[in-house]
Image: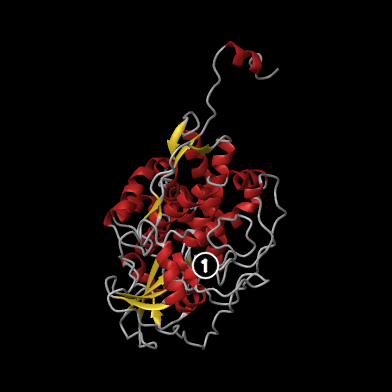
Amino acid sequence: MLCPHGLPGEGAPAAPRAAPSPPAGPPSERPPPPSAPSGHPSDGQPAASPTVPTEPPPPARGDPYLPPPLRAAPAGRAPSLLDPGTERDPYPLYRTLRGRFPLLYDEPFGAWLISRYADVRAALADPRLAAPEPGPALAHLDTGAPDAHRALVSPAFQDGAPAALAAGVERAAYVLALRLADRQDVDLVAEFCQWLPTAAVVSALGLPYEATARVHSLCRAGLDHLGGHHPALADLLGPHIARRRAHPGDDLLSLLCTARTDGRPLTDEAVTGVAGVLLGAGGGTTARALATFLANLLDHPGQLDAIRDRPELADGAWAESLRRDPPLHVVPRRALEAIGPIPAGATVACLLGAAGRDPRRFADPDRYDAFRADPGTLAYGSGRHFCPGTLLARLTAVHGLRALLDVLPHLRRVPGDRPPAEGLVSRSPRTLPVRLRRPAPAGPQAIARRGPPRVRGR
């Protein structure tokens, strides 16, 4: 997900994906031809343009972020993220902010709000707007132990880490999916999404599967995407680190234990810290993003069936889910100096949830379209640290979906009310009830239609 040290928008923007040929299915599930966005009155849009709006170029490295014009809100009626009903449905407020108040100080929330896509992207890339400070497990990357940072960005580690992460995610996804195979109705959030990110990192590190529950508990107790420290993690990893130093394998923990900078191995503390970052990256944010991704596809069964037939479409469907429904709607930054009306030391809230649905940037922005050619890049990060969180989240989504579709081919939403997404700063469905198997037919007529049972080997 959004790396806490990342600067989305650095470098050239990613090339748009080629739009795949539309799959067969009902018209509502087919990607529409490119068209101009329909203007939202509250966004103050002009008449529709005959072309799809394109992404503004990112600011050059030397150009500072210039905030949008400040518009004063009428006294007593300034909109706020804390207004009643916003947590339930923030999108009407986002439309108001984008159209009338692209830069607004939200006094109840205590932050300057930036809501348009181009402004959010520029703000996230501005070095004068600082990301939150790293937690204790990441502190060694900035002070006192530069060897750990050099090891993380070394070609040897970056070449080996993706393969180890991919193998771990794939193993964990199939184990969890197979555990559900005999069930009919389950909550995917509680029994798949909340477990897969942690189980994937445990598997990638080469830890025994039995350690998953304990590591999961540690993650919930204190580890987060900023590398929050938990003393029990060092106790858990200590014996495994000692064994990997003596007998390394091809897992991620072995890569860390054998990594060398200036001819010296990483300390046990550095190895534990990096493992903590991995586990934190696979925590709540990735689980929320996975739940939203699966919910979006289950809400569009035609698109889900297309990905079942063409797995290569999963990456685009994942990026589209992050655009339309990011797990983090509010990303904070701190102003290191005054920037226009924003004073030094102030908190700036970059509203990813609003930016991802900006009609100035995206045609039909409220629609989930797994075949969208260019879903944008705000939910991805890059920066001076090697952060595997983005890679881990994508692998979790792609391999998790593939395992579910392979093991549970009849996966569908449970009929009835669909639990909505919840949350203000972080947002996702808290439950995702699904049906895994078709109801078994009953009665002699159904048996006659089925015919005699098939016997393996005949």
Locate residue 164 relative to residue 127 in the image: left or right: right
Locate residue 241 relative to residue 394 in the image: left or right: left
Q: Is residue 285 above or below residue 354?
A: above
Instruction: Decide which of 319, 10 is in the foreground and name it.
Output: 319
In which quadrant of the rendered image does the C terminus lie?
Answer: top right
Q: Is residue 220 above or below residue 106?
A: above
Q: Residue furthest right?
A: 21
Q: How many marks?
A: 1
Instruction: Decide which of 440, 78 is in the foreground and name it.
Output: 78
Residue visible at 56% across and 20% down?
441
Residue visible at 47% across and 70% down?
42
The percent coordinates of residue 34 (x first, y second) are 68, 63
Q: Give residue 424's quadrant in the image.
A: bottom left
Colour scheme employed for the rendering of this structure:
secondary structure
Evaluate whether residue 440 shows in this view. yes
Locate residue 301 relative to residue 214 in the image: left or right: right
The percent coordinates of residue 188 (x first, y second) are 44, 42
Q: Give residue 228's quadrant in the image.
A: bottom left
**Which type of secondary structure does the marked residue at label 1 adopt?**
loop
Instruction: Decide which of 11, 166 is in the foreground and name it.
Output: 11
The percent coordinates of residue 127 (x first, y second) are 44, 82
Residue visible at 32% across and 85% down?
344
Q: Amino acid at mark 1?
A: His
Evaluate whether residue 454 shows in this view. no
According to the picture, the residue beneath numbered tag 1 turns out to be 40
Query: Alpha-carbon neighbours of circle 1 within 10 Å: few (<14), some, or many (≥20)?
Result: some
The percent coordinates of residue 83 (x first, y second) are 31, 65
